[in-house]
Image (spheres, rainbow, N blue to C red):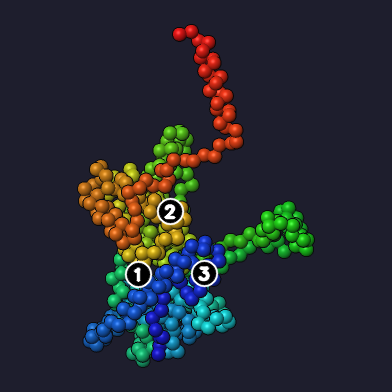
Amino acid sequence: MWLRGLRLTAGTTCARNQFPHVPHVLGKIFAAHRKYRRRDADMASSSTEMDPDLARQLFFEGATIVIFGLPEGSEFGIDSNSWQVGPRFKGVKMVPPGIHFIHYSVKRLVGASGETGPRSGMFLYLEQKEICLFRWDSKEEEMVAAFQEEAENLREQLTSLDRSLGPYPYESLRSWVSLTNHISKEAMLRLQPACGTICSFPEVLPMEEMTHTADRAKHNLPRYDTVCQNYKEGMSRLPQMKQKEGTEIRFSQLPEKMYPKNASAAEITQHSMDLSYALGQLLEINYPGNPLAFLAELQFSFVCFLLGNVYEGFEQWKNLLNLLCRAETFSLQHPDLYSEVISVLYHQLAQVPTDFFIDIVSQNNFLTSTLQVLFSFLCSAPTNKDLRKKALRFRTHLTKRFQWDFEEDPQDCAPLVVQLPEGWEKAINTDQSAHIESNAEIPS
């Protein structure tokens, strides 16, 4: 067999072990998502065979991804599908043109049986009849793209490779397109790392070597051969790391300040409650004159998180969503953008099980409280009629599917509880007595 059974879509065998730098909450999220996708796998495996004439046409008209040397037992996937690699696997055929995300996790040589390493992936934009050729580099442990000329030389050999190429699972195409319909080729190239590969564990390098005692003394750091006195000192001995240049996903930088320069106290308060200014600044810098292009990054970051196992993708998605959901003035000015935002969120949340966000919701309740603010102004009278109607339907859908309550006041609007110092009651009583006595001296 070229592939051995459909497997999980997000996360590998031991998600918790692969994400030690990520909060424990995400380990449970990926576990829940594995259960969800396994149910989808059962349905996909029972689908009917494709018509032979249609399959023949798609074979020659669709794109082909050829991969030589990927170790047997590894996990390989394209879009929202993944499999375990068998001995004859050499790629995927009949791939529809457009945006795709291929991802892989290589089988570990040591450790538990069947365990795979961290996931790596890359976005591809495929043309009709295009051939992409990759070779496995065992030294660097990554797939390396061949030159296009070498890939084209394989065209005459495609028929002989047919038995080693798996067909693209068209039953999942509709859901994949709904997750990426705003990602253009230009957006993909702008956001993807310069190296082309998105790693759940990108390579990091020390910011300074500090291999000599003099280097550490310059930064007032203790010698390595001295006994560590406490946790803080131990942390200071660790080298400061930075991600290897060229491996960073090129997400948009969020505004450092949510308000204009020289803003008054009242303006700072206003812009902190309504993030329209911050959202406008981000769009003006990164997507000038085309606010809808912003949705490509919202989708890109979600796919990086969901399929690439990249925690930074989740953080960017959350931050972008926070800006969108708290920009009331901007929503009134751009109803078309917010109508598309609802569609994007609808399809993104459709990809996860109902308990997918339970742990995240309990951690600062970011999703329900953020969407609650969004609905508070999208479902109100000043909003465009069609947008308001769409927002109401979306709120009803989320309430029914996830059992989220959007009627209560958001947590960030709750009264602030302040701890008062000891003896505050006595001090207040003394002040009140003095105030009464002083008032008694004033003639009526």
Amino acid type at circle 2 is Asn
From mark 2 to mark 1, how far is it between C-alphas?
Answer: 33 Å
x and y, in percent, of residue 113 in the image: 53, 83
From mark 1 to mark 3, how far is it between C-alphas?
Answer: 29 Å
Q: Is residue 32 left or right of residue 424?
A: left
Q: Is residue 195 visible?
A: no
Amino acid type at circle 3 is Arg
- Determine the residue located farthest toward the bottom in the rendered image: 160
Q: Is residue 433 above or below residue 316?
A: above
Contact check, label 2 and label 1, Cβ < 8 Å: no
x and y, in percent, of residue 286 in the image: 40, 53
Mark 2 closeness class: few <14, some 14–19, many ≥20 residues within 10 Å: some
Mark 3 closeness class: few <14, some 14–19, many ≥20 residues within 10 Å: many
x and y, in percent, of residue 125 in the image: 36, 71
- Determine the residue located farthest toward the top in the rendered image: 443
Q: Is residue 129 left or right of residue 136?
A: left
Amino acid type at circle 1 is Ile
* Residue for point 42% across, 72% down: 34
For label 3, the residue is 16
Picture disc at residue 365: 2
